[in-house]
Image (cartoon, rainbow, N blue to C red):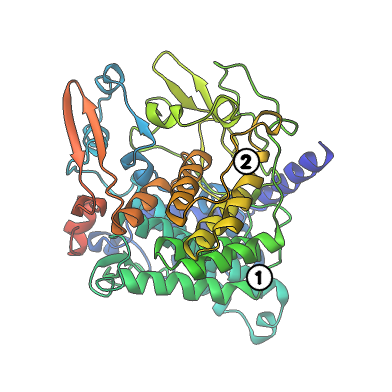
Amino acid sequence: MDELISKQQIKMKMKNRLYNKKMIVAITIATIMVFMAGCDSFLDLKSSNNYATVSTIEDVEAILNNTQIMNFRSPCLGEASADDIYIPDQVYDRITKNSSRDTYIWKETDYGQASSPWGTTYETVFYANVCLEALEKMSAEEKQEVRWARARAAALVFRSNAFLQGIWIWGKAYDESTAGNDLGMVIKTNPDVNEPSVRKSVKDTYQQIIGDLNDAIKYLPNIAEVPVTPSKAAAYGLLARTYLSMRQYETAGLYADSCLQLNNELMNFNTDINIPAPTSSVNPFNIFNKEVIFSTVIGSFYFAVSPTYAVIDTMLIYSYDDTDLRRRVFFRNTANGAAMRGNYSQSSSQYFTGISTAEMMLVRAECMVRENFVREGLELIDWLRTHRYSNGIRPALNMEMTQQEALDMVLVERRKELVMRSLRWMDVKRLNKEGRNILLKRYVNGEEYLLLPNESKYARPLPTDVIALSGMLQN
């Protein structure tokens, strides 16, 4: 408990840094500007040097420590499009926003960027670029400081994370043979809104992410005192995610291993948490528990993925064994079905999207099995399961199973452990490139909607006003 209080106090101190006069000016200007990034019609209304008010290392750190902007802006569109959740008919009928209804059934829809996942993604990118530009303008003496280098590295990590979550949503699944031509993200590396918005390729997007994370690693602390700030472990974890989504499994496994060498702690669900009553909405997890390496969340829900509407897929719920505590910890019973409550976040209504030790173990195990180290991968999975089942009582693992059987089993455990982490959409895309033929279905008032494997709709549409104002190519 003393450790938790200490971390909370540190977090409050970080937030309090925002309340200096210069930062109020900077944040106000940037908030207005970011929603219009890439919109030529706005250029006459702003001055290109408005964000010059950010000039000191204290200013930069105040932005980077603003969790509402840098950590709580994960886009929700991938989760809204994936198959972890469904919306009951009686709930769907009450949704008044057409874009939410249409997105749920993968229909082309019209939504504006300012309040959309695209807008919030590029808000984080914008603030990171403001920090990077301010740091570059500092004196040579300042650039020799460890504090300067860490601030720059942190900004690179935040920007990389935003690009990574974005490419999973708006880009096609990575395919080495086509990635050079497939449309990716707008790679904004400075805060100048006069710069035309141009979509780079999927390959260029991933190269930017990898380059920035590798640049950042050498200047970061091994472990963050409070996991809302980037660390080496966080950067290794993001690189593991990056290479996993590229299906470069050997490299993904190595980065996951590097992350776990810095932190491999697991909670035991038998002893480390109190399981609430079945219908309680109380989140049983402490924020910044020992599994959290880097904390990011979906802070707002533009689409119907919100816990207000969505319930967990019934077949997914059935996949948990009777003694698997994750069923009782992660979910609560409602009149409509099982709803998510167990997030490594501030509340049950915020979906955690950050890096955890359990995720890295699952990445490492999957990559081990794919490299034909089957027994080693299964042993790592079984170690995780000992911390998740009631009193460690779990179905025995056959350590002699084939490589394919082991991979199937690891992927099932991955889905059960990482439910509602904004990872499933990426997983479906990468696994379908390997012929898994995962077919997504929605049922609305007796009508069936299908999303076929590798269909073009897996690259979700950009906001229509962004396309209209920038002239970029639409998915």
| Residue underneath mark 1 | 150
| Residue underneath mark 2 | 385
**Observer-nearest of 142 and 340:** 340
Q: Residue at x 34, y 52 (%)?
A: 118
The answer to which quarter of the image holds residue 280 is top right
Circle 1: is it few (<14), some (14-19), or many (20+) Cα within 10 Å? Answer: many
Residue 424 placement (x, y as % from top left): 40, 46
Residue 148 placement (x, y as % from top left): 66, 74
**Residue reaching furthest bottom?**
140
Q: Which mark is residue 38?
A: none
Task: Using the image, determine if residue 226 lies above or below residue 148.
Answer: above
Q: Secondary structure at mark 2?
A: helix
Amino acid carrying label 2: it is Arg
**Observer-nearest of 474 and 239:** 239
**Residue reaching furthest front?**
400
Residue 410 placement (x, y as % from top left): 50, 48
Circle 2: is it few (<14), some (14-19), or many (20+) Cα within 10 Å? Answer: many
Q: Is 399 left or right of 465, judged from the image as shown?
A: right
Q: Secondary structure at mark 1?
A: helix
Say which label, 1 or 2, has the lower sequence index.
1
Q: Residue at x 27, y 75 (%)?
A: 180
Q: Is 157 left or right of 468, judged from the image as shown?
A: right
> In which quadrant of the rendered image does the C terminus lie?
bottom left
> In which quadrant of the rendered image does the N terminus lie?
top right
Q: Is 246 left or right of 286, judged from the image as shown?
A: left
Residue 212 placement (x, y as % from top left): 50, 73
Task: Using the image, determine if residue 336 lies above or below residue 104.
Answer: above
Amino acid carrying label 1: it is Arg
**Observer-nearest of 191 and 184:** 184
Q: Is residue 194 visible?
A: no
**Residue reaching furthest top?**
335
Q: Residue at x 29, y 59 (%)?
A: 433
